[in-house]
Amino acid sequence: MADVHLWKAEKNGKNKSSAIWNIIRERGQIVSWTSLVWSSKIILRHRFILWLAFRGKLSTRDRIFAYMDILDANCVLCSGFAESIDHLFGGCFFVKSIWNLFTLAMGIVSLPGSWEDIKVAAQVLSKGSKYHANVFKCGFDAIVYHLWAERNARVFGRVRRNVDHVWSDIVFDCGALIRTWRRIPKSEREWVLCHEWKVNYDEVTSFKCFKAN
Ligand SMILES: [Zn+2]
């Protein structure tokens, strides 16, 4: 029998670039928080910071202190405790105030107190593609991004913002993305969510708006 070429990525006589990519790439471990971090319902520039936060790779002062001397290793948001990722997103009173505003806006009773438990709870609450879960993803990631941005602003001596100011930036960012979503169900729960995130409910649920976009 004559030699013939045989491509692994060939299907019905055609090579598919997606199949080639799947053959040549190295597959990493799939982690439980993938769908929360790499969701299209999250603002693009926020995803990278959330990814670093979930991997514990943000350059918090406890990590910097491990390889170089720094004058102050305390949290810049509360100045009372050593800065670590667990403190920055879990134990800090500044952060707790933001999580409280978030749970109020989402209609959730509360989130756990530690960052490890918050991450687990967030994966449960963001499951699925319902409007509520999507708003949760967007808000959760915006909080991590803006807390890290506020921390950096204080470290590098820029303007210090209070809890209300940071929260209004989070709502502004999320509202801008949520306004682009369509096919939002018409119900009281969605109306309340739109109200909390300063999104015009009539605009995002109207047929006219859907058609125009
Ligand atoms: Zn703190």
Image (cartoon, helix red, strand yellow):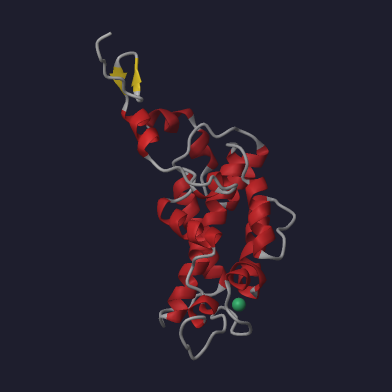
Q: Position of residue 96 (x, y in %)?
A: 66, 68
Whether residue 164 is visible here, answered yes or no, is yes
Of all residues, the one furthest to the right in this rendering is 109
Q: What residue do we see at 73% from left, 58% from top?
A: 110
> Can you give x and y, in whole percent of width and height, for residue 211 in the image?
41, 28
Residue 37 or residue 6, whichever sits in front: 6
Q: Nearer the viewer, residue 108 or 120?
A: 120
Q: Position of residue 134 (x, y in %)?
A: 56, 43
Quadrant into which the C terminus falls: top left
Q: How many marks?
A: 0
Residue at (49%, 51%) from the top-left corner?
A: 175
Name the residue at 25% across, 15% down: 3
Instruction: Give how far across and how far down residue 209 sits, in percent.
Output: 43, 33
Q: Determine the residue located farthest toward the top in the rendered image.
A: 1
Q: Quadrant of residue 103?
A: bottom right
8 on left or right of 139? left
Note whether 167 is above or below 20 in the view shown: below
Q: Up-down: is 46 above or below 132?
A: below
Dividing the image into four quarters, tell me where ligand 1 lies: bottom right
Which of the pair 30/39 is nearer the observer?
A: 30
Residue at the farthest front position: 1
Residue 140 higher or lower than 131, as above or below: below
Foreground residue, 22 or 37? 22
Q: Say whether residue 40 is left or right of residue 186.
A: left
- Is residue 143 in sight in this rendering? no
Q: Which quadrant is the N terminus positioned in?
A: top left
